[in-house]
Image (cartoon, coloured by chain):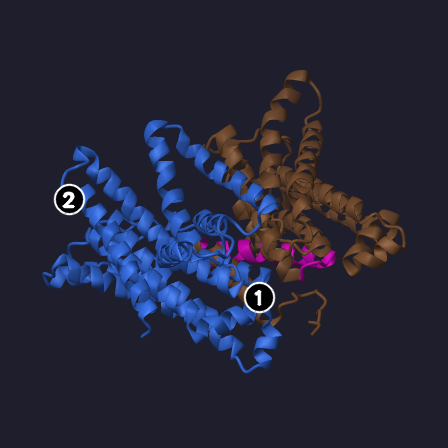
Amino acid sequence: MPKIMKKKYLINIIAVAVVFLILCLLFDTGLLGRKAAYFNGLVTIGMFYTIIVCSLNLLTGYMGEFSLGHAGFMSIGAYASAIATTIISDHVQLSSIALYLIAIIIGGLAAAIIGVLVGIPALRLSGDYLCIVTVAVAEIVRVVLSNVGIKPITGNATFGKSFAGIARVSDYHYVYITMVICIAIMYCYIRSRYGRALISIREDRIAAAASGINVTRTKVLTFTISAAFAGVAGAIYAHYITTLVPTYFNFSKSSEFLAIVILGGSGSMTGSIIAAPILSALPQLISYVFPDFASYRMLIYAVVLVVVMIFKPTGLFGGKEFSLPDLILDGKRKKKEKVS
Amino acid sequence: MTKLIQSLMYGLNLGSIYALTALGYTMVYGIIRMINFAHGDFIMVGGFTLFYTIPVMKNLGLPLWLAVIAAICVCVGVGVLTEQIAYKPVRGQGSTTALITALGMSLVLENGALVVFGSAPRNVPPMFSLPTIEIMGASIPGQTLLTLAIGVVVMIILSLFIKYTKLGKAMRAVPEDKVASTLVGINVNKIITITFAIGSGLAAIASMMYTTSYVSIKNELGITLGLKAFVAAVLGGIGSVAGAMVGGLLLGIVEILVKVYMLPGTYEAVTYLILIVVLLVRPTGLLGKAVSEKV
């Protein structure tokens, strides 16, 4: 590995660790006092939003297709993981980290399986039609979840349309590490040969196919990965909020995710990582001060969305990425140049 | 048998609501290739206009159907404003931008209504008081038949308008070829605005039909109704006026039949399942024309 790469990895790892330590400092030392639990919750919500928004950005920004059904994949992950952990914790006593790992793996896998099943037929379509199919899939999932009660296999838990009593294992330490790993995987995927193939398909599908790229396989793979991370986000959500209601995962939720992707800038992971926590936590913070704000939240998003589309359709970051190592190393280089 | 006739009539009634809404989607899509997500919300706007104007008409002693005229005016106003403010600037910036803008406008209207009218459902006062009519043993409310009749009449008038008038011909010409339409002297921008106006007017009539049959309205009405009407438009073949009517009526009948004879809670799932199957088997819809991709 070249020395410069090593340096960049080191800087990134240090940055990630520093943020983690800051979070620990804020929440574990009692610095925030009684409000720690509240801010802790905001950060956890911000983090699962980041995962799902990044996963949606994979489709929107790099594949150039829209999904207005990501709340559906999220609900699959949430319900599957919740059922799994509830059954497991009825039989065996597991530590919370084991339960958490099982939850995110089951959630991701379940959503990925549905993602493949939907993706193989649906990705023959593109553009508006694909978008509508994802809406349809999410609505079917929602209707099925609202109608089919899941019978409890063992005594304790109450399953069914709304699902209560899920173990609360989404601790922010775990969630933060999960988020970092998820984003790293997605980023690596985009930079891999599959990711480059994907971008070439976005730019020109026919030219990509002509130069030997298997268009369908690449698209289905990306769709599945995106669905899987949406499922992981769902699992985190389920094990944080502990009660699931099918109506939460509706069309409005899906459009909220898409709105965040677009506002942050489609095709920019940085944009999603910055926009998701801000747009999920900021409204809550504001409504902490002004209780009436909650009802204005989506209106303001929507107006901003339309205005952004008219004046800067590429969003906040518009496909650009921010890199801390580049910033530091370039800064040093410039200094050296000045000196010499 | 009685049950079947009754369900069919209700199905036709619901279907004509879908058909009128689907017409708005299909006309706009045909002309600017954009899913106008906000179209469903125009119906919600129309519904709230009726909610507020019907008591006013009652107090003034005017005939209640004047409220429909008011609803049409408001809806056309909102539709044209939406087009002028939001859609016109992004025209020609690619389908992605158009889709997001449409979604954004839908969210603006939906959440604007939430702020203005609140989230509680409202009951629109009845506009007509008609006796229940018996057809072959099945008793059907008069307003169901009346709205069905209005829907059918509006669709016939629209078909004739599009087929025979100069404006209608221009509306058919623009989707075929924008440049050529400009060459023969059609003001494309004006036609697009008129299309939005007609679509919104149809949405107002659909809202009248909806409120007479289902009474209760809510700020989220636009999304559910709009999505299903869009399904109807795709089912019939998007861009095709006849297709929207057939798709709408078909969808309405299927939904009611599923509701009555199968699991009542799952009719929405059936609707979307039909959409997926149609898109996979015949993406152009039942009456749509296949467009081959240019390389």
Can residue A158 be seen?
A: no
Identity of the residue drawn at 32% across and 31% down: A288
Q: CA separation, marks 1 and 2?
A: 48 Å
Q: Which mark is residue A31?
A: none
Whether B27 is drawn above or below A305: the answer is: below
Q: Quadrant of the rendered structure where residue B4 is?
A: bottom right
Q: Please state which amino acid type lies under the numbered disc 1.
A: Ser
Question: Badge 2 local density, few (<14 within 10 Å), some, or many (20+)?
Answer: some
Whether A252 is drawn above or below A185: the answer is: above
Give the residues drawn in magenta, as a range: B237-264
Q: Does the CB distance between marks 1 and 2 fall below 8 Å?
A: no
Q: Main secondary structure of the magenta part?
A: helix
Q: Chain B is which colour?
A: brown
Q: Chain of mark 1?
A: A
Q: Quadrant of the rendered structure where residue A100 is?
A: bottom left
Would residue B254 be counted in the magenta stretch? yes
Q: Position of residue A285 (x, y in %)?
A: 34, 35
* Residue found at the far left of this picture: A93
In the foreground, B43 or A260: A260
Q: Quadrant of the C terminus of chain A?
A: bottom left
At mark 1, the secondary structure is loop
* Location of mark 1 (residue): A126
| Labels 1, 2: front one | 2
Identity of the residue drawn at 63% across and 20% down: B56
In the foreground, B13 or A215: A215
* Location of mark 2 (residue): A28
Q: Quadrant of the rendered structure where residue B124 is?
A: top right
